[in-house]
């Protein structure tokens, strides 16, 4: 906490020995599991070359930090281990995450509220829940995320791929987000925006976290879900300026055709291969 100019590097291993926590917390859902490694209010932070295994909860937590470079990490936990995010980011700015392997039981990278200017590149993700922005706006909270750019990454056997998730009734925005040159290998929900995450039954008048200026360019590979593109936007303003270009995926199930589903999503698509995305509104 509050250490500026900190560098952590080398070939060491941080083992959270999480199985006893996972088993216990299956019975007591409220048990307060720790993150194996947490940084709070650390600026000019550098972390590289470490191995992280079997965290009790998140493997690495970044909160309230500015100017962070994370690279050459190997983060692993069993696919069934609960809430073992690889890197969890909140209220932090100007982060670089690159040249790493993350395979856990939850998000490879989770980007939470009040975070901006985050670049993720050359990360192999899987198993896990993909790279996620959110969830944002739980309990009507105001939260913002902007300038997140993911490029040259691979999702292998993940539950989700490139995901943005917000709670119904939340406030704030997620904007200026891009996913470019992404490879999917048997990934579920390869491209997904969900503005009704968990709280699907909230009244339509409660509003949404605004989602805008999101682009998907050069996404290729295979999907385990026939619905390879899913833009589930709220009943209000919906999602704005969604751009889909050069997307070409095939089904991991022989003979199945991929398709896209949109609800109140506005934007443009030049995808003329599989899946086509004709459902975007002007």
Image: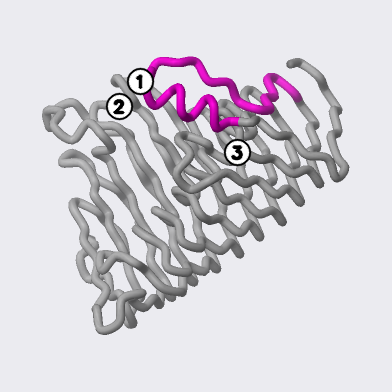
Q: Quadrant of residue 154?
A: bottom right
Q: Quadrant of residue 60?
A: top right
x, y (%) of residue 2? 76, 16
x, y (%) of residue 112? 49, 32
Q: CA distance from mark 1 to mark 2?
A: 5 Å
Residue 176 visible, this orientation = no
Q: Is residue 65 magenta?
A: no
Residue 105 visible, this orientation = yes
Q: Secondary structure at mark 1?
A: loop
Left or right: 4 in relation to 280:
right
Can you tell which of label 1 and label 3 is closer to the viewer?
3
Q: CA distance from mark 3 to mark 2?
A: 24 Å
Residue hosting label 1: 141
| Residue 170 circle label | 2
Q: Secondary structure at mark 3?
A: strand
Residue 71 in the image: above or below residue 156: above
Q: Residues within 10 Å of mark 3 (few under 14, many from 20)?
A: many
Q: Earlier in the sequence, mark 1 or mark 3?
A: 3
The magenta stretch spans which residues? Answer: 18-42
State yes or no: discs 1 and 2 in contact (Cβ < 8 Å). yes
| Residue 94 circle label | none
Residue at horizontal 24 percent and vertical 49 percent from the top: 232
Q: Earlier in the sequence, mark 1 or mark 2?
A: 1
x, y (%) of residue 234? 21, 41
Looking at the picture, the colour scheme in use is: one colour
State yes or no: discs 1 and 3 in contact (Cβ < 8 Å). no
Residue 29 in the image: above or below residue 72: above
């Amino acid at each position: 906490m509050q250490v500026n100019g900190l560098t952590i590097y080398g070939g060491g291993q941080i083992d959270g020995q999480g199985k006893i926590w996972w088993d216990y917390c299956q019975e007591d859902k409220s048990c307060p599991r720790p993150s194996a490694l947490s940084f709070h209010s650390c600026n000019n932070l550098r972390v590289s070359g470490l191995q992280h295994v079997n965290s009790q909860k998140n493997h690495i937590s970044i909160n309230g930090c500015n100017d962070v470079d994370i690279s050459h990490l190997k983060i692993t936990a069993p696919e069934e281990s609960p809430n073992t995010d690889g890197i969890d980011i909140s209220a932090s700015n100007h982060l670089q995450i690159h040249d790493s392997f993350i395979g856990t039981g939850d998000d490879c990278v989770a980007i939470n509220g009040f975070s901006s200017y985050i670049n993720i590149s050359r990360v192999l993700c899987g198993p896990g829940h993909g790279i996620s922005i959110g969830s944002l706006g739980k309990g009507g909270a105001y939260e913002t995320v902007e300038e997140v750019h993911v490029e040259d990454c691979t999702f292998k056997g993940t539950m989700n791929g490139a995901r943005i998730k917000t709670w119904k009734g939340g406030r704030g925005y997620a904007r200026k987000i891009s996913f470019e040159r992404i490879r999917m290998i048997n990934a579920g929900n390869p491209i997904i925006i969900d503005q009704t995450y968990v709280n699907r039954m909230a009244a339509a008048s409660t509003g949404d976290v605004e989602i805008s200026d999101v682009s998907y360019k050069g996404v290729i590979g295979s999907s385990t879900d026939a619905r390879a593109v899913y833009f589930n936007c709220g009943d209000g303003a919906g999602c704005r300026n969604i751009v889909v270009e050069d997307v070409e995926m095939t089904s991991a199930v022989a003979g199945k055709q991929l398709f896209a589903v949109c609800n109140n999503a506005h934007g443009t698509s030049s995808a003329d291969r599989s899946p086509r995305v004709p459902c975007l509104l002007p």
